[in-house]
Image (spheres, grey):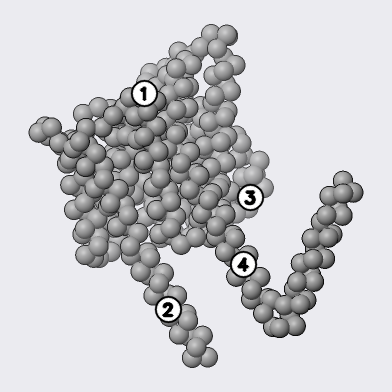
Amino acid sequence: MSEILSMSRAMMDHRSAVNGAGMAFGIAPRYWSVMESSRLSLLASLVVFLAGAFWGLYWLPVRGIAGLGLSGAWGSVAAGLAGTLVLLPFAWRARAALRRADKLALAATALGGFSFFLYSVSYIYGQVAIVVILFFLAPVWATLLGRWWMGWPITRIRLLVLVCGLAGLAMMLGGDGALPVPRALGEWLGLLAGLFWAVASIGIRVRPTMPPVAGAFVFVGGAFGGGLVLAPFLSGWPGLAGPAGLAGLVGGVVVTGAFWWACLLIGIMWATPKLDPARTSILLMVEVPVAALSAAILISDHLTAPQIIGGALVVAAGLLEVVPARRARAISHVSARRGVHRR
């Protein structure tokens, strides 16, 4: 411990000396501020990228839990419960913020959690790559709902988002000449998950925000509560594993809930305010290729040529969705710089 304290003091003395030398030239405060901001942005980008990559592998624990005996939707319910319990102590500390939170913001956040529950269950009943691409149609539904519900204009970029997304949907589901509608339960759940996420994202956007931990608790709680109501209709009552497999099942549920539903979610909520919204969206889209490639390699879950083209169009729609955010950020940055120069 003494060695650690000595190293800490030495580092502080060195930084103080550098700051002091820099102060003599009048450059240190701004230099260190920019340097710290750059490092924080880099760390936040890494957190979001890794979170997206791990969510692309989420189908593995979902199917693993089902294989251990907690079949159907009940594995996702159990993982949601584990995540809720992990976040409960932190939510208790933030209980005052939860009491003051906007009620519609709470409802929108809980609906977002429920949409992720549907997304989770869709991996049990559908093809992994198709499910994840159908969920990422959310920008298409958000554009249509924003126009109908909030009166938001559909710009040329938004129109291109609609064209790419709907064309991709038609290619994925009707590329073989059949009617372009979902055919399996998993496909329907993935599509509904994206639709509900679009509704939730609009509600979260237009209502006051909550602290990250409180928001994460409501999000995961919405997944658990909604899943608990819906699971009996999707899967009936679960058939639990025998005593020999119970330890593995409980371990899988706890790890899935604690890591995917709690840690990764808190990481995203911590990192998102520190990044440009467009960068966050692009980094999170790593989930699509990770899910598709991992499923193709591990379980030979391959896409056909029309499905690949359709998936590429959906991903393109998601990338186009972030263009207005980048443009707004750039305009804001230029305006701020002009304001500084005028002063």
Query: What residue is rendered at 17% in x and 41% in y?
Result: 170
Q: Is residue 194 above or below residue 331?
A: above
Query: What residue is rendered at 84% in x and 59% in y?
Result: 9
What residue does disc 2 label? Answer: 334
Q: CA distance from mark 1 to mark 4?
A: 44 Å
Q: Tell me if residue 148 can be seen.
A: no
Q: CA distance from mark 2 to mark 4?
A: 21 Å
What residue does disc 3 label? Answer: 94
x and y, in percent, of residue 168 in the image: 21, 44
What type is the residue that disc 2 sits on?
Val
Q: Tell me if residue 77 can be seen.
A: yes
What residue does disc 1 label? Answer: 299
Q: CA distance from mark 3 to mark 1?
A: 42 Å
Q: Quadrant of residue 52?
A: top left
x and y, in percent, of residue 231 in the image: 40, 26
What type is the residue that disc 3 sits on?
Ala
> Which of the two labelled residues, at mark 2 and mark 1, occupies the earlier sequence position?
1
The residue carrying pointer 1 sits among few (fewer than 14), some (14 to 19) or many (20 or more) residues within 10 Å by Cα, namely few
